[in-house]
Amino acid sequence: MNTWFSELQTRNVSLGIRIEDVLWHEKTQYQELAVLQTEAYGRMLVLDGAIQTTTQDEFVYHEMITHVPLLLHPNPRRVAVIGGGDGGAIREILKQPGIEEAHLIEIDEKVMEASKRFFPEIAQGLEDDRAHVHFTDGIAWVKQARDFDVIIVDSTDPVGPAEGLFAPEFYQNIYDALSRDGIMVAQSESPFLEPDIIQRVVAGVSRSFPVTRLYLASVPTYPSGLWSFTLGSKQPLRPARRVPLETRYWTPNIQDSCFHLPRFVEDLIR
Ligand code: AG3
């Protein structure tokens, strides 16, 4: 089979990946969902034409969006993930000792259904007793949420239903939903291709949080391959806790160095 999937990442850039099979394709109430089998990256979950996760590189994103904030919190017990219906972030959160509740707030039930069926190794955490799933709009949910230690925004790009997940009011609602030592993280796109989104997220988060930090990780199937995460903390950051974790990307040294940024990225958020 010589069929190629290509994601139009910006008006001027696309990423092509040869596909071996289309395993699933449907229009859900919210978006177009596809599961593709590829030689290069294994199975791939695609929403509205944008690659969300692949079995080959998902570990980078899911480890970095969870362990970095969790280890900076003194004692995270109640954690929430907004978006992330594939379950990858929940799987990582549950690796940490002391977690009592891991809530997942996903608007589209079909994403989780597809993940359980086609990505069991990513969705595995969803079966845990500590995992609580809410199929609802994260923007509304966060307004009534209280006493969370860490909130992780694992969203799609800021178009369509996810637009509101990049708004300053949303970050303020997250602030109010967090406990005294609360920390939030949001995925914030690529410094090469979407620098203004990073600036917008960093500015929005720092309107509510006294401490705002950016960090990067390499995710080959995301636009440009270099991805950013924006962290907001209610308290000054302390050195990260040391906890033994089985990971493939995250290491204690990466934890300690991740806020050291390339100069062009530093300049971007100054
Ligand atoms: N959420 C971030 C995906 C952004 C990718 N953007 C793109 N391909 N244009 C990933 C969800 C994983 N749990």
Image: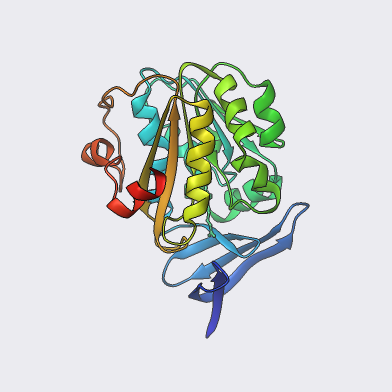
Q: Residue 21, located in which quarter of the rendered image?
A: bottom right
Quadrant, the C terminus = top left
Residue 61 seen in render: no
Residue farthest along the top direction in this orientation: 180
Q: From the viewer's perspective, tell me whether residue 217 is left or right of residue 204.
A: left
Q: Residue 259, located in which quarter of the rendered image?
A: top left
Tell me the residue at 78%/52% (across/down). Answer: 29
From the top left corner, tell me how far across and down residue 229 is, in percent.
Answer: 43, 43
From the top left corner, tell me how far across and down residue 196 is, in percent.
Answer: 51, 53
Residue farthest along the right direction in this orientation: 29
How many numbered discs sit on the rendered protein? 0
Q: Is residue 40 above or below residue 200?
A: below
From the top left corner, tell me how far across and down residue 147 is, in percent.
Answer: 55, 16
Front in this rendered view, residue 228 or 205: 205
Tell me the residue at 47%/40% (across/down). Answer: 202
Q: Is residue 122 above or below residue 54?
A: above
Q: Residue 9, located in which quarter of the rendered image?
A: bottom right
Question: Which color scheme did the rendering employ for the protein?
Answer: rainbow
Front in this rendered view, residue 100 or 174: 174
Residue farthest along the bottom direction in this orientation: 2
Tell me the residue at 52%/50% (across/down). Answer: 197
Q: From the viewer's perspective, tell me whether residue 186 is left or right of residue 32.
A: left
Residue 196 seen in render: yes
From the top left corner, tell me how far across and down residue 134 is, in percent.
Answer: 67, 32
Q: From the viewer's perspective, tell me whether residue 150 is left or right of residue 25.
A: left
Tell me the residue at 37%/35% (across/down). Answer: 67
